[in-house]
Image (tube, helix red, strand yellow):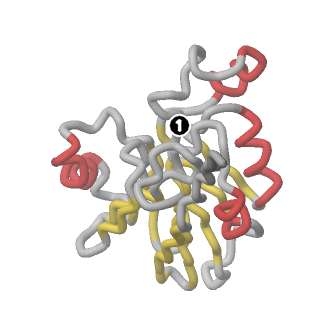
Amino acid sequence: MSYHRHLRIALLSDTHGVLDGRVAAVIEGSDWIVHAGDIGNAEVLHQLARLGDKLVAVRGNNDTPSHWPQQDHAILTALPHERSIALPGGELLVLHGHRINPAAQRHSRLRERYPAARAVVYGHSHRLVEDIEQGPWVLNPGAAGRARTHGGPSCLILQVKAGQWHVEHHRFVPKSVTTRSTRKR
């Protein structure tokens, strides 16, 4: 991999079986698509694999046989609980984050546990977070599906060029629920 090549890495999490189409449109064409757990089923992984060059995914606390369709269990058991990706300028560490507690200390504990990483990507909270004031960066892309999106489905795009890293966040307005009212005449 050329050190000067521009890389576009899509970061997402917590699809819970449904990839929001607007997130899919943003991440399409990425060099890497990274899913930080609570995937939901193999179909989400197949969709992601069609959208980018390389796919990395880890298991979340809901990525268990009881939550996945039976036909997807072989794919599920092959998923690791964490992954490391060597990129120009540093290591990107990916995990779901549900095992790092208490939640109020999650960022400091991630930094203590992975001090050599340039950035740690996690999911679980469904909350979009860019904690980049100190190293390693701690990034949570929020929920890229429909479940508990806390302001709308979201993802992060990590731009890497010549070892320099830049994070863009993308959040979409939640799809409104249409209700019908019936008037009596």
Drawn side of residue 166 relative to residue 25, left or right: left
Residue 182 visible? The answer is no
Total tally of numbered discs in the picture:
1
Give above or below for 37 relative to 86: above
* Residue 133 sits in quarter: bottom left
Residue 165 visible? The answer is yes
Circle 1 residues within 10 Å: few <14, some 14–19, many ≥20: many
Q: Which residue is mark 1?
A: 38
Residue 170 location (% of width, % of height): 53, 71
> Which residue is pictured at 26% across the width and 46% down the height?
113
Drawn side of residue 35 relative to residue 127, left or right: right
* Residue 88 sits in quarter: bottom right
Give above or below for 170 relative to 79: below
Given residues 107 and 16, the one toward you in this image is: 16
Element on which disc 1 rests:
loop
Quadrant location of the N terminus in the rendered image: bottom right
Drawn side of residue 36 relative to residue 137, left or right: right
Residue 179 location (% of width, % of height): 61, 50
Given residues 26 and 30, the one toward you in this image is: 26
Residue 180 location (% of width, % of height): 64, 49
